[in-house]
Image (cartoon, rainbow, N blue to C red):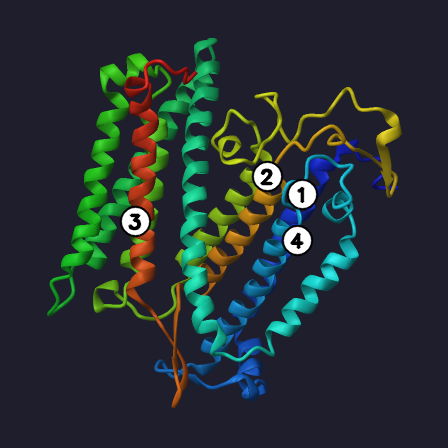
Amino acid sequence: LCCRSCPSCTHSTSTRMVYAVLFLITTIVAWVMLDPEISNRLANSHPDVGKVTCDSGNCAYEWARLAVYRVMFATGIFFAALALIMVRVQNSRDCRAGLQNGMWGTKILVLAGTMVGAFFIDNTFFTGWGWVGLVGAFFFMVIQLILLVDFAHSWNESWLGKAEDGSKCYSFGLVASAVLLYLASAIGTILMFVYYTRTEGESCTLNKFFIDFNLALAILCTVFALHPRIREALPSSGLLQSGVVIIYTTYLTWSSVSDSPDVCSGSNGSSTAPVVLGAIMTFVCVGYSALRTSSASQMGKLGMSTADDSSANLLDEADDIDDADDEEAGGQRVVDNEKHGVLYSWTFFHLVFALASLYMMMILTDWAVLKSSSDTGINIERGWPAVWVRMVSSWLVVLMYLWTLVAPLVLSDRNFS
């Protein structure tokens, strides 16, 4: 009865929403593995898969992080397999469309079975998988950065257009949002200087460099955003977009300096705040990548949209779909709007989720680095590679944003409207 009262939807809409919910559920399962009671049981029930060396004395937590590795390994393999299966699907008449848009019970059983099987894999396997996770997390962050830049420009253009139509509310919102973003970034930078650059007996030179360089890039973004020539070529340029970019790079810098292996990080224990913020941003990114499929957007240029119409969107209903192509899903009318061509790349869609699984694996394990030893088994510790991955990513987002500002000047013969 509830479904009968729901509005009609399209296959492209309902399918992506179900996959997003499935990803959310698997992430929650991985998060639950960090619960102290569950981690204690894991530490006492898996002697056959290897030993774990716990320098911190908290062996249960190390086993919990290995459990997160296993859950997100299964999730990543699940979406990677779907990405391979869906290569070169052109429309919903393809025999593989049934797997993409249906067979949910079978897919859930396969995913659950893969998770269970992952708990019987020897611990040493995940020392190599940890590096795969680190590389995959980097590529997901690149996609996340493209989404961020796209979101910043879309937000500004939407509110600026309404402000130009005479809406004082949106004019105030633009100014207030920019001020809040810059204020939050400034406070974050000050706190980083206070807590992560002053340790007795240590110069904390690298932390100071990271924070100083991020501050210099923030100033550079602001100068470019307000430069007269850039404003002339790109009238929508402003402090709102630069504020979004700066607050994100400040977050990445904080995540790096607070999680570095040296004593300047303030604590070598688990930190909840970066994990929570990282998880929230991942869910927002995954949801945005599912909703933002306009081929005019940055994700459209990456392959998320294959529609010819530049304004095609996940939430748009196709008016030219015949009733014969509709289905009843528990009383709800589901429209097959991809019989003439898919509205997004099914392979790329699943690839994003596979990379998101690797990124969440690193986030939930506090960017743990696994090392193998024949004598002591698996040793889990922090490492510099994870720090540099996040810092390089923050610099990439600045370069990407600056390019969107100078591109209209450099490539004056192209239309960037």
Name which residue lies at 60% across and 76% down. 119
The quadrant of the rendering that contains the C terminus is: top left
- Tell me how far mark 4 sits from mark 3, CA to CA: 30 Å
Task: State the SS at label 3.
Answer: helix
Residue neighbourhood size for the residue with mark 2, other residues' Cα within 10 Å, grouped as few (<14), some (14–19), many (≥20):
many
Disc 2/disc 3 C-alpha distance (Å):
26 Å
Image spot of residue 219 (x, y percent): 21, 34
Q: Secondary structure at mark 4?
A: helix
Q: CA distance from mark 1 to mark 2?
A: 8 Å
Marked residue nearer the N-terminal end (2 or 3): 2
The residue tagged 1 is 17
Image coords of residue 93 (percent x, y): 78, 37
Q: Helix, strand, or loop for circle 2? A: helix
Residue 22 shows which numbered tag? 4
Tell me if residue 170 comes above or below residue 181 in the rendering.
above
Residue 195's place in the image compared with 48, above or below, is above
Mark 1: secondary structure: helix
Q: Who comes first in sequence, dot 4 or dot 3? A: 4
The image quadrant of residue 241 is top left
Q: Give the amino acid type for the residue marked by disc 3 in the picture.
A: Val
* One can see residue 259 in this view: no
Report the residue marked by disc 2: 290
The residue at the point 23 percent across, 20 percent down is 227
Instruction: Give the amino acid at mark 4.
Output: Leu
Residue density around tag 1, few if under 14, some if 14–19, many if 20 or more, within 10 Å: some
Q: Which mark, by number, is residue 392?
A: 3
